[in-house]
Structure formats: C-alpha cells, structure tokens
Amino acid sequence: MNLLTFRTEEDLNRAGAGLIASLLQIKPKAALGLATGSTPIGIYEELVKLHRSGSVSFAKASSYNLDEYVGLSGSHPASYRCFMNTHLFDLVDIDPANTHVPNGLAVDLEQECDYYDAMLEDAGIDLQLLGLGHNGHIGFNEPDDSLIAGTHAAMLQRQTIEANARFFDSEQDVPKQAITMGVAGIMKARQIMLVVRGASKAKIAQQALTGPITTQCPASLLQLHPNLVVLMDEAAGAWAK
Ligand SMILES: N[C@@H]1[C@@H](O)[C@H](O)[C@@H](COP(=O)(O)O)O[C@@H]1O
C-alpha cells in the first residue's frame, strides 16, 4: 500500500489527476473505474484542465462507474450519470458510448447487474478510483456480516442516506437502494486509487487501512490489494505521519 498525504487539496487533486493522465498516456485505451461523491470532484476538475491544455485525451478510453441510485434516470440531477456528465464526460473528449454507469431504471435489476459484471469482466479495469463512506463503505457496499462479490442492488444504510441527502432536496428524496459494483469487481482492478478528504473521515480511514480486515468495514478489504495507492489530505491522513 502506498499512503500519500498532501498539504493542500490542490496538490492532492494534481496528484490524483496526474496518475490517471499518466495511465492514459501509457495506455490510451485504458478502462477507468470511476466514482462519484464530493471526493473526486477536484480530481475531475484537474483532469479537465489537463485535457484543455492538450496533456490528456480520453478519446480511446472507456469508463465504468461504481454505482447508481435505483429509480433515478440519467437526467435526474442527483443521479450519478448526471454527476459524471456534468463533472467530466461532457467536458473531455471521451466517447459517450464508452461511458458506463449502471442503469438505475432497469426493470430487471438482477439482469442489469449481470450485464454490468459481464462488461466489467470484458473490459478489465486498469485503475479504480474510490471515495470512502463515513461508515467504511466503498461504492455502495455497506458494512454487514457478509459482502457480495458481484454487482448487485444494495439497500442503503441510514448513515449513508443522511450523508447523501445534501445532493437532494430532502432526505426523503434519497433513494433507499442502489446498484453497486461488488467488492470482487472493485478488487479485480489492476490498480486502486482511494481518495480520502477531511477530518471527519480520519478515523474510518485509519481503521480501514490499519485495522482488522472485516466485512464490517468494507474498505478494509483494500488492504489485500497488491496495488493500492491512497491519497489523503492532511486532515484525513494526520494519523499516517
Ligand atoms: N456511493 C458513494 C461512494 O462511492 C462515495 O465514495 C461516498 C463518499 O462520498 P463523498 O465523497 O461525498 O464523501 O458516497 C457515496 O455513498
């Protein structure tokens, strides 16, 4: 595991974007595993800047997002599809046909999950970007007695609904279910970049990265990944010094 702490958010964003840009330079057809939430926004902003300056192209790349709310269409402003279009896809030269986000409106969720897994298997994620939930979740893999390997429809925990209510008009509007890549799908990525920001996540980051590996903290499984890089700001990574 490579633990990196950054003095400023700008430094962290540059490092994160730099990693993705270097991969695309070496492997233009890279399959990127992407994440939503507030954590990756700064990294996407840096990537857009790099793209505008001509330093990076997504023209041959493909992307696979971690998750999507069940019941939201891609045009709903709080959907992860809409988030990705707004923060990255519409601002760079990626072919929209090569961007993949689970379909939250799928009538048959099981079929949608199987379809997504088959796509992931085919693509082989080169780099998976991850944020961290306050309860240790990754994607929408919530703490539990057991975890699910493949893409599945997950029930969101109260804490997650509360944390994500800021993206909706009210807490009642937050969907209770989401389609998420499973832990095996995440762990299959050739490289994982976990990004953690803010003092409120310091404790769970420390627990996930140095504590016991347990399904009660899904991010702790990342300790088993052979190629994990963790980017933290000083507030989240104070314990790592
Ligand atoms: N499903 C997403 C996760 O993929 C994300 O990592 C997490 C943290 O979000 P934030 O970065 O906004 O703290 O929230 C959501 O629940």
Image (tube, rainbow, N blue to C red):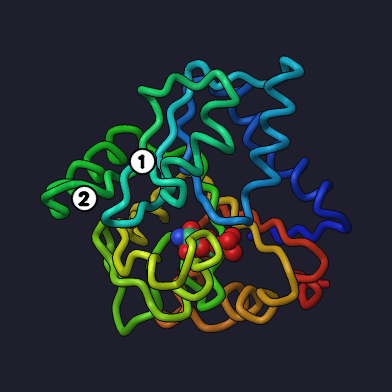
Numbered badge on residue 169: none
Looking at the image, residue 237 sits to the left or right of residue 34; the answer is right
Give me the disc on residue 113.
Answer: 2
| Mark 2 → mark 1, Cα distance in angstroms | 17 Å
Q: Amino acid at mark 2?
A: Cys
Task: Tell me: 198 left or right of 111.
Answer: right
The N terminus, quarter of image: bottom right
Q: Is residue 48 left or right of residue 63?
A: right
| Mark 1, residue position | 74
Between 234 and 121, which is closer to the camera in this rendering? 234
Return the x and y of residue 54 as percentages of the image width and height: 72, 15
Residue at the (39%, 46%) spot, across then down: 76
Q: Position of residue 122 (x, y in %)?
A: 28, 33
In the rendered image of this protein, does residue 90 appear above or below residue 158? above
Residue at far front of view:
169
- Name the residue: 32% across, 59% down: 182
From the viewer's side, name the closer residue of 201 and 146: 201
Say what secondary structure mark 2 lies in.
helix
Residue drawn 28% across the image and 40% down it: 121
Helix, strand or loop at label 1? It is loop
Q: Identify the mark nearer the N-term, 2 or 1.
A: 1
Q: Position of residue 172 (x, y in %)?
A: 39, 72
| Rendered-image quadrant of the C terminus | bottom right
Query: Is residue 223 in sight in this rendering?
Result: no
Crowdedness near tag 2: few (<14), some (14–19) or many (≥20) residues, C-alpha within 10 Å: many
Examine the image and state in which quarter residue 178 appears.
Answer: bottom left
Amino acid type, callout 1? Gly
Note whether residue 28 is visible.
Answer: yes
